[in-house]
Amino acid sequence: MRFKNFFTERPVWYWTSVLLVSVIAFIAVFTSRWTRLHRDAVLTITKVEPFYLSKSTDLEGLATKLDSLGWVDKKKEFRWAGRLLGWNHFRRGRYELPADINYDNLFDKLGKGLQDPLNLTVLPGTDLESFQRRLAQRFAFDSTAVRQVFADSSFLQEKSLSRQHLFGRMLPDTYQFYWTESPKVVISKILEHFQDEVAGQYGNRIHEIRFDLGDMVTLASIIEWEARREDEKKTISGLYWNRLNRGMRLQADPTVLFALGERRRLYYKDYEIDHPYNTYIHKGLPPGPITNPGLGSIEAALYPADHDFLYMVATPEGTHLFSETYEQHKQKSRDWREWLQKQYRIKERREAAEQQRQNKQSTR
């Protein structure tokens, strides 16, 4: 009876007020929660940088990972938001998280695996080992996985390429990939870009000459390694074409360096190394590319300059002096050697003077 009287003895305005207060309180709580979930920034990101999930994880694992970075202030609220929004599985990947991201967008992005692509820049004139290491630094896989692709006989057979010819077609450019993509997918996409940019663009020219595309990539790789300046590439190409057309050996220093497996000053004994890539011993082009040439070098190989040069020698500035006859070449080579010897003498005098200065200081 008392319980009944409690309701009947209260006027209508009282219950109207109670209802209104309850509605307002509900709206306030709802608005606060909705704002927290959908509008407020939830991460304390001090430095914008990619966020990596190396493996799929649950809500607790994600909270721990973000907390270890100092990005989560309220772990309990973080768990509450995840459960309320129905997220408990988050996919591995590379994500770029803006500082103002809210719970809804955060969980949606990581739960659906909406990765942000990364830029991969393939540099010209590199070597296979460096290329493999660079890929391993940018992606979730390691360098061993990349090496396995280049050693995969079925994959190479599918592409109708040897390992070195495949590497020669890793066209220098900037590409976009997802961090979790496999090395086979990455390499295949770069190869597809080569097919579009080279085989597709220069197909008619390749049919006009007596060498195939593989030969041109090989020649371009030598040009890439030899030329420091873009404006010399077609001249160098013309020189090599002249030698090939006359049945002469290419005598290209880069092929000897490739055979030696290092880049350094060459000595007379180096030119005698018994290696299929040594063009001082073997006529014609080497068995495959010595590096991955850029488009400029490929175009130079396909469209050489028209001249009668057969010899060249490097200059101190990193360019080349070209000659039509061996006598001219010998004189220019002699001048180059004399310049080198002069530089060595200057270096030795400087080192001796520095050693004397250090000796005087040590005796004071």
Image (cartoon, rainbow, N blue to C red):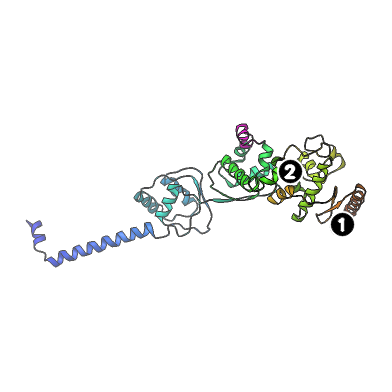
- Find residue 360 and report its image quarter: bottom right
- Disc 1 is placed on an element classified as helix
- Which residue position holds label 2? 209
User: Which quadrant would residue 250 be assigned to in this image?
Assistant: top right
Give the image location of residue 313, x and y in percent.
85, 50
Q: Nearer the viewer, mark 1 or mark 2?
A: 2
Q: Which is more toward the observer, 225 or 105?
A: 225
- State whether residue 250 appears in this view: no
**Residue 156 is a magenta residue:** yes
Structural crowding at the residue carrying mark 1, measured as other residues with C-alpha within 10 Å and reported as few (<14), some (14–19) or many (≥20) = few
User: Percent x, y for residue 73?
Assistant: 43, 56
Along the viewing direction, whichever of 314 and 26 lies nearer the viewer: 314
List the residue tagged with mark 1: 350
* Cα–Cα gap, marks 1 and 2: 53 Å
For the stretch drawn in magenta, the main secondary structure is helix
Using the rendered image of the protein, determine whether residue 116 is visible from the camera's viewpoint. Answer: yes
Residue lying at the far left in this picture: please name it: 1
The kind of residue tagged 2 is Ile
Question: Type of residue at label 1?
Answer: Arg
Of label 1 and label 2, which has the lower sequence position? 2
Q: In this view, does 124 lie to the left or right of 249?
A: left
